[in-house]
Amino acid sequence: MDKSNLTEQLIALFKEHSILYCVIGGQAVNAYAAPVVSLDLDLVVATNQLRQVEKLVNRSFRVER
């Protein structure tokens, strides 16, 4: 369980800044099937918004390239 609400925080941030995104990987599977344990969050963002997303996310999270 995500006790820090990471997913909710990112989605709210993306909505606030009109970022186009898609959740993939284990978290996406959890939306349609029996929950699976996933220790990461996989997101796809529009390539033309990548720099904007990196700046936004860097404010609150550690970003690795």
Image (cartoon, helix red, strand yellow):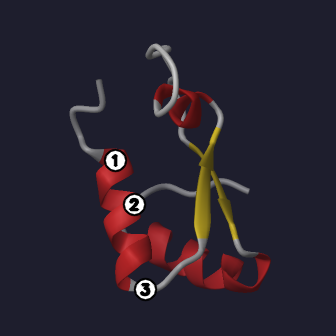
Residue 64 at what x, y percent from top left?
A: 65, 53
Q: Farthest residue to the right: give it.
A: 47
Q: Which quarter of the image is occupied by the N terminus?
A: top left
Q: Name the residue beneath numbered marker 3.
A: 17
The residue at 46%/77% (across/down) is 56
* Nearest to the observer: residue 38 or residue 23: 23
Q: Is residue 23 above or below residue 39?
A: below
Answer with the quarter of the image where residue 29 lies.
Answer: top right
Q: Is residue 52 above or below residue 22?
A: below
Say whether residue 4 is left or right of residue 18.
left
Say whether residue 45 is left or right of residue 55.
right
Label 3 to label 2: alpha-carbon separation: 11 Å
Q: Earlier in the sequence, mark 3 or mark 2?
A: 2
Residue 8 at what x, y percent from top left?
A: 31, 53
Q: Name the residue beneath numbered marker 1.
A: 6
Q: Between label 3 and label 1, give the one nearer the viewer.
A: 3
What residue type is disc 2 on?
Answer: Leu
Q: Name the residue beneath numbered marker 2.
A: 10
Q: Residues within 10 Å of mark 2 (few under 14, many from 20)?
A: some
What residue type is disc 1 on?
Answer: Leu
Residue 35 at what x, y percent from top left?
A: 44, 16
Answer with the quarter of the image where residue 65 lies.
Answer: bottom right
* Nearest to the observer: residue 41 or residue 54: 41
What residue type is disc 3 on?
Answer: His
